[in-house]
Amino acid sequence: MGPSLQRRVASVLAGLWAGLLLGIGAIGAPAGFAVTTAEIAGRIAGHMFATEAYVSLAVAMALLLLTRKAIAVEAGEPAAPALNTNVLLVLGTLFCTITGYFVIQPMMAAARAGAGSLSFGTLHGISAAFFVLKGLLVFALAWRLTAR
């Protein structure tokens, strides 16, 4: 796969990922709370965010491979640093996904059951902040990849 095709594939993946995050965060989750009880909507949103977390891990790994490979194969240009802005953006999304879902979500479940030192609301706010930050990082990555 040549550098041009790699960049196009990475651009499409980043754009689709950005759309997924926007769709879940701005449409899917709020719509559930608008039409059903908080308990049912919370379960639906939880399932959407769980699916999104695993999709985010897969897409981030694919983009990490594509952006790292693009560093190594672009001919006619000086050697690029191993950690360029695109790679750092992808690593940031991985951090947000792992921390925001795989660390905070179990703490939220414990808080809902009455355990833990932080309240459910506080943990929900932290998790939402990581989701928003991840969305901003993905949008920045998509913007950068489509710049050429």
Image (cartoon, rainbow, N blue to C red):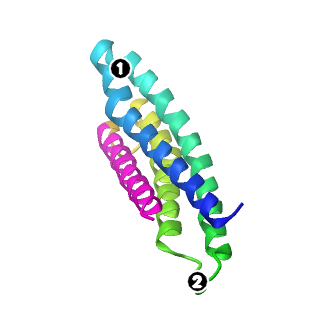
Say whether residue 130 is magenta: yes
* 3, 101: nearer the viewer: 3
Q: Which residue is mark 2?
A: 77
Say whether residue 128 is magenta: yes
Indicate which disc, 2 or 1, sits on the residue closer to the N terminus. Answer: 1
The magenta segment is 121-148
Position in image of residue 6 (x %, y %): 62, 59
In front: label 2 or label 1: 2
Position in image of residue 124 (x %, y %): 34, 40
Look at the picture and state if 88 lies above or below 63. below
**Distance in Å between CA atoms under marks 2 and 1:** 50 Å
* 13, 101: nearer the viewer: 13
Q: Which residue is mark 1?
A: 32
Look at the picture and state if 90 lies above or below 108. below
Identify the residue at the far top of this view. 36
Position in image of residue 40 (x %, y %): 40, 16
